[in-house]
Amino acid sequence: MDEGRGPQPQPSDEALAARVAARDAAALAALYDRYARPVYSMAAYSLGTADAEEVVQDVFLSLWNKAGQFDPARSSFGAWFMAIARHRVLDELRRRGYQQRLLAGETADRLLATTVDESADVAEEAWQRQRGEAVAQALRDLPDEQRRVLMLAYFAGLSHSAMAHHLGWPLGTVKKRIRLGLQKLRRALAPPAGVLSDSPAMTHSSATRIVPGPAAPTAAAASPQHAVEPSPVSRPTAAGTG
Amino acid sequence: MSPTESTQAMQAMRATHVTGAMSCDQVQALSDAYAAGALTAQEHERVDRHLVGCAACRRHVAESVEVASTLPLALAAASSLRLPAGLRDRVLHAVEANAIDRPRRRDEPGRRTPGVVVRCRRSAALRTIAALAAALVLALPVGLGVQLGVALARERALRSELASLVGQQEVVLEVVDARQTVKRLLVPPEGGASSNAPYGKLYTRPDMPHVVAMAGRLPPLLPGYAYHLWVRYQRQDQLAGVLLVNQGFGLLVFDADRDGPVYEVAWITAQPLQPAGAALASTPSGTTILRWQQPPGS
């Protein structure tokens, strides 16, 4: 490294995805290092550690084959990729039955309700770990009932009505708690207005970033030139409109 | 079937499938639930359809989706699980083995986000189904046995194509073809079952939450009408969904959110689709075409 130049900024997730689309295996390895553990954790707590390995392999193979389908104008890479991973996990979880789904959601809720940082000694990209810790803290700060419905929805794939049935709450209450929970999470994770960053290495995605603390980069610091739009979250759909 | 008739059949199918269009207010009110994965398959599909044509709602939903996508990162941060030794090498080796696939360029036609790829495949599949249906209309063979064989083959082919169309083929096969499958037969309510009358089948499995409903020999409907499947569960009537119909054969797959749902009654009505922006029907109406009821005392 030349003196005075400092460390080179890490490539964004989106830049790596483009290289994966061009069949760059090293770029895929870099994305593995950033995202394998979240995928593995989600799969392990839902399906068990043995099956979680297969899920990780399948998901990154999907990435290899589908990277050309990722459109950075529609979403961040993280959102797109986590949708693929979640879909894969829920597909298998649904085959195992309703009780297994409930268990997955309740397990995630218990883990995120009380755990303090357990992963300090786990080798992981510093940026991703920091981001995860910020989200975990925000979840611990949520009212229990709001966090619980978010966990049951996201990790167990339960619909409003299924949660109302399981929890014995009115349907309107479930909907309200999901909305409030995600809104609080969004506010807790949004960077303060007017704070600028001179640390491009902090941000891996050129889309909306979620970072902790007061000295956080703003989303505008390296925002894309065009509006970020979501990809519809892939999930099993019903034939007809069931 | 002529090209014009094929186009008309495809349009009729699209009209049947695009039901209950949502307004922007409705979509934005559901954006957090959408992002968290709390919508039913039906609601999710309706939001997706709205998002295809609404950039403002896509931006609104994008924010919620970004937040929700950080939840697995939180799980990883809160967990002491380590990635298994050697997993990285196994994944990269699997990728290298797969690298014999043809290279895909970023500017390759059809490059889309996952949801839109599904819709593009559906559009292509709709045209394929119309062509398939046309190809299956054979010249009448001699002998009843051969005619029945043609009809059965046609039903199987249409069933398979419809299931593939909506990406549920594996689920359909698992629910319909298992040893523990429970099948309920829906018949015309006036007892008019015959070789020409409509018929329906409702498949459930005790160990799965998915329900598959099929119906055959359905008469064509007026524009603005669709076949609705209703179920009664714990004395409450609920709309299970609207059948996707082609060439008189209808299919609906839905998640009952409980394993092996036990319904008291199931019936299919032909009733009007709700206007754009309104919720789907909340009460049965119109004509009951097919019905099954749990026998008393069972």
Image: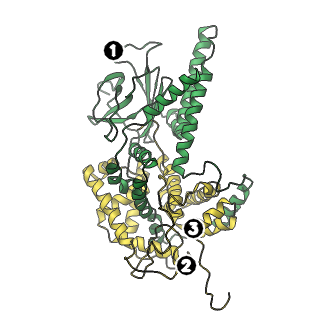
Residue type for callout 2: Ala
| Numbered mark located on residue A13 in the image | 3
Q: Which residue is mark 2?
A: A201
Q: Position of residue A104 (x, y in %)?
A: 43, 57
- Tell me if B48 is positioned left or right of A7 in this view: left
Residue type for callout 3: Asp
Q: Position of residue B163 (x, y in %)?
A: 53, 35
2 and 1 marks on the same chain: no
Residue, far bottom: A3
**Chain depicted in yellow:** A
Residue, far top: B142
Mark 3 or mark 2: whose residue is earlier in sequence: 3
Quarter placement of the C terminus of chain B: top left
Colour representing chain B: green
- Tell me if A96 is positioned left or right of A53 in this view: left
Question: Alpha carbon of mark 3 to alpha carbon of mark 1: how far?
Answer: 62 Å
